[in-house]
Image (spheres, rainbow, N blue to C red):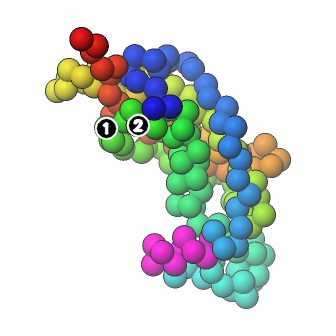
Amino acid sequence: MAGLYFEEFEVGQVFEHAITRTVTEMDNMLFSSLTYNPQPLHIDHDFASKTDWGQPLVNSLFTLGLMIGVSVHETTLGTTIGNLGMTDVKFPKPVFHGDTIRSTSEIVSKRESKSRPGAGIVELLHRAYNQRGEIVAECTRQAFMHKKPVEG
């Protein structure tokens, strides 16, 4: 698998994820519909045109999912047991249709599991940026990670 095992993460390590993604109106409409979110700020151009933003905002949970999703291949693909939590979620700037998002992940801490000898917890700080380099999202994620399999 492409993901890293617990032992392969180093505190301070930064991943500049190569995948970028231009967010479309279809992404926003589909995500909002699939999650039953009828917020007119996301799905109604007329309503949104009369707000402070003057246009629809991309659903922030789509932005969160995209930011973390693009990190998977280089960090946790096939090596994670699961997510334990996401904290300190922030959206300092809005995302609009047509914005291109890139992400980074920084390893902020790691510790061995107290309950599972073959696992550890890695804390990642994810950040997403728009095409102007402005931070549009960030969160700290606690990932429950497998240790390297014992060969034998």
Tell me the element at label 1: strand
Q: Residue 32 colored magenta?
A: yes
Q: Is residue 135 visible?
A: no
- Name, please, the residue furthest toward the front: 152
Task: Please provide the residue range marked out in magenta.
Answer: 28-36
Residue at (43% x, 43% y) in the render: 87
Q: Is residue 5 above or below residue 68?
A: above
* Residue 82, x across and y down, in percent: 33, 42
Please name the residue that numbered disc 2 is placed on.
78
The disc at residue 54 is none
Residue 39 sits in which quadrant? Answer: bottom right
In this view, 34 is above or below 150: below
Observer able to see residue 147: yes
Look at the image and tell me in which quarter the N terminus lies: top left
Please provide percent x and percent y for residue 32: 54, 74
The reply to whether callout 1 and callout 2 are in contact (CB within 8 Å) is no
Residue tagged by mark 1? Answer: 81
Q: Give the secondary structure at mark 2.
A: loop
Q: Mark 2: which amino acid?
A: Gly
* Left/right of residue 115 with respect to residue 139 in the rendered view: left
